Amino acid sequence: MPVEVGEGVVRDYRVMAELWPAPSAAGPVGATVSVPGSKSLTNRALLLAALAEGVSVLRNPLRSRDTTLMADALRSLGIGVRDLDDGDWEVTGGPLRGGARIDCGLAGTVMRFVPAAAVLADGPVHFDGDPGARVRPMTTVLTALRDLGAEVAGDRLPFTLNATGHLPGGEVTIDASASSQFVSGLLLAGARYDRGVTIRHAGPPVPSMPHVVMTVAALREAGVTVDDGTPDVWRVEPGPIGARTWEIEPDLSNATPFLAAGAVTGGRVTVAHWPSATHQPGDVFRGLLAEMGAEVVLDDRGVTVTGPDRLVGIDADLHEVGELTPTVAAVAALADTPSRIRGVAHLRGHETDRLAALVSEINGLGGRARETEDGLVIEPAPLHGGRWRSYADHRMATAGAVIGLRVPGVSVEDIGTTSKTIPDFPGMWAAMLGGGAGVSDAERTEGVVG
Ligand SMILES: O=C(O)C1=C[C@@H](OP(=O)(O)O)[C@@H](O)[C@H](O)C1
Ligand SMILES: C=C(OP(=O)(O)O)C(=O)O
């Protein structure tokens, strides 16, 4: 069935479920690319706008599956989310209505952020999601909400919150070592709890901390008082959340496959409109590509990556920026020297078990990858064409596209899954290659790189 995924883009999932012949690059890729808005910033802004008093506007939001699910979740809770002509969103905050059924899809930001807000609804709220979502870690969020005074039936998706219109709030201790989103979700809604919220983390280090910093910054922009002065403790004072205009930055994690295209083909790719200061983890990719031998320049045109003659491997701890792992692993699989990626055990609870998936797919093309306790080791090996499975994971699909640039004959399963965070990835990829660098399927042979 054709489905509108935003910005007038319609995807036909019958077609998208088929194999996508990843275009290989006949030569260096040269392009300037603009990527749509940040998923993480869009879904924080939508949620804060819903909990605010008054009317907020999101400028340049991401319109993709994850953010449409967030908008629809808020609409089912009685919030006005209006599509403006230019793709912006207007959100009118107000009381939350019970009786809603929320589809979380596979979106971590929906399944971890919305329940913490939905406790303020005036009746039961039921949550469910994709089959893959039902196995993502959730217990910590639901236990924390119970500890703060909520009644919840269930420990993971599907579950029902028996909301009563308010939450006592107060202090809670959680183990957020499986996901930073456990902290962010409680922080985002905490100002609307009777006593605000104090979260103490007890356990191995919280991953993806820049995303928590992003949450604290967003709250402060909305006028909320947050104390994050003590490591692993966050305090949100009770009080109103301000309505405002949110300017959404481009999604820098979604920029990474495009920058990688410049790096792995010895080409030059610019991603425009790169923010000069940002909390997005994707900004870290600049340094990672430079370590792998690329030339990386940030100037007023954006970020420009020029690929080297010879890519080298990397030894990197990606604990803070785990969502970059699939792209880094794809580049590493094409490098001339070994790579080690550390600090990302929590990726086993992402859209899929990303460590197992990357090992399986890289090795399926002839590569030499193996899992460690907290990451991956990838050694140089000649790669050949073949099927690259996506596991309903947008970043697995884009990683396959990066490898396909250098390895003829790679077919990516379910490229449509990229619509989780990019409305038209195949179209953007084709446009990037439009300068003549792509070769047609007819010209393909089972090639070897390495
Ligand atoms: O808060 C957010 O917007 C996100 C936090 C991170 O989650 P984890 O801490 O679970 O890795 C990140 O990987 C995810 O893509 C988005
Ligand atoms: C981990 C990710 O997503 P989610 O927000 O669903 O956790 C991701 O986008 O890499």
Image (tube, grey):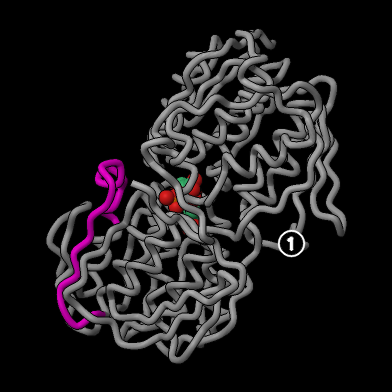
Q: Quadrant of the C terminus?
A: top right
Residue 399 place in picture, x, y as percent: 56, 32
* Relative height, residue 339 to residue 223 (above, below): above
Above or below: residue 303 compared with residue 305:
below
Is 95 a magenta residue? no
The magenta segment: 121-140
For the question of whether residue 224 can be seen, the reply is yes
**Left or right of 33 in this view: 427:** left
Q: Quadrant of residue 217?
A: bottom right
Packing grade of label 1 (10 A; few <14, some 14-19, many >=20) is some
Question: Residue shown at 59%/19% (left/top)?
Answer: 378
Q: Secondary structure at mark 1?
A: loop
Q: Quadrant of residue 57?
A: bottom right
Does residue 286 appear to the left or right of 13 in the view shown?
Answer: right
Q: Is mark 1 within 8 Å of ligand 1?
A: no
Front-most of residues 175 and 306: 306
Q: Position of residue 183 (x, y in %)?
A: 41, 62
Q: Against 376, is 447 above or below?
A: above
Q: Quick check: can you spot residue 207?
A: no
The residue lying toward the viewer, choosing from 233 and 102, is 102
Q: Quadrant of residue 149?
A: bottom left
**Residue closer to the observer: 150 or 373:** 150
**Pointer 1 residue:** 275
Mark 1 residue type: Pro
Image coordinates of residue 218 in percent, x first then y, are 55, 73
- Which residue is depicted at the point 27% across and 64% down? 144
Q: Position of residue 235 (x, y in %)?
A: 45, 75
